[in-house]
Image (tube, rainbow, N blue to C red):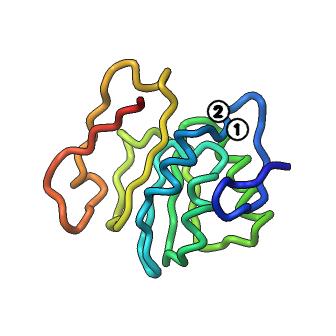
């Protein structure tokens, strides 16, 4: 059993998946989620970002990942912490069309996934205030 770095929420991790690191902690420290927001976590993995986001009482959270092991573990972590305002999708975000908007889009991709810069159109996520591109990078 591990715990999230900021709010000490219990969670399970798996050695076969990417684990929390300093980048994960930095994202959690900087994320701006308000009560009632809708949240999308791209590459949710075991759901650590959603766990931390849940503290701010969003109305709904969606986690998406192409790895079924990650989605299964995210579901286990949501159940462990009695989080019910979440949907977890095992699919490619670039091939997914959402029928609703997100107030907050988060992603903590592993460097190996971003060997080539990936650009996603924000309007794909129907963010209310932006008509630009989201560039996912990792330092």
Could you say where residue 56 lies in the image, as x and y percent from the top left? Answer: 53, 74
Can residue 64 be seen here? The reply is yes
Q: Which residue is drawn at 80% across and 49% down?
A: 2
27 vs 9, left or right, is: left
Work out how far the residue at label 2 is from the one at label 1, CA to CA, in angstroms.
11 Å
Mark 2: secondary structure: loop
What is the count of numbered marks?
2
Q: Crowdedness of circle 2 by 10 Å Cα count: few (<14), some, many (20+)?
A: few
Assess whether mark 1 and mark 2 are in contact (beta carbons under 8 angstroms): no
Report the front residue among 111 and 74. 111
| Mark identifier at residue 99 | none
Q: Please name whichever residue, 78 or 93, is drawn nearer the observer in this view of the structure.
A: 78
Label 1: state its secondary structure: helix
Quadrant in which the C terminus is drawn: top left
Most distant residue in the right direction? 1
Q: Quadrant of residue 13?
A: top right
How far across and how far down the image is residue 42, in percent? 46, 47
In front of the other: label 2 or label 1? Answer: 2
Foreground pick, 94 / 5: 5
- The residue at 42%/74% (across/down) is 37
Residue at point 75%, 72% (across, down): 82
Q: In this view, does 19 lie above or below 97?
A: above
Q: Does residue 54 sit above or below 15 in this rendering?
A: below
State the mark number for residue 18: 2
The image shows residue 48 at horizontal and vertical percentages of: 63, 52
Please indicate whether residue 9 sits to the left or right of residue 119 in the image.
right
Does any portion of residue 76 appear in the rendered image? no
Farthest-out residue, left: 131
Q: Give whichever of discs 2 and 1 has the lower sequence position.
A: 2
The residue beneath circle 1 is 69
93 or 43: which is nearer to us? 43
The residue at 58%/59% (across/down) is: 50
């Amino acid at each position: 059993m591990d715990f999230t770095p900021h709010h000490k929420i219990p969670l399970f991790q798996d050695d076969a998946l990417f684990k929390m690191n300093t980048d994960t902690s930095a994202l959690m420290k900087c994320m701006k989620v308000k009560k009632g927001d809708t949240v999308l976590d791209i590459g949710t993995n075991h759901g650590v970002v959603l766990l931390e986001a849940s503290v701010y009482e969003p109305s709904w959270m969606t986690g998406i990942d192409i790895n079924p092991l990650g989605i299964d573990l995210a579901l286990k972590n949501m159940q462990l912490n009695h989080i019910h305002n979440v949907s977890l999708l095992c699919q490619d975000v670039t091939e997914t069309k959402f029928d609703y908007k997100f107030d907050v889009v988060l992603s903590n991709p592993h460097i190996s996934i971003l060997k080539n810069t990936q650009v996603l159109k924000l309007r794909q996520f129907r963010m209310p205030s932006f008509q630009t591109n989201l560039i996912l990078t990792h330092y």
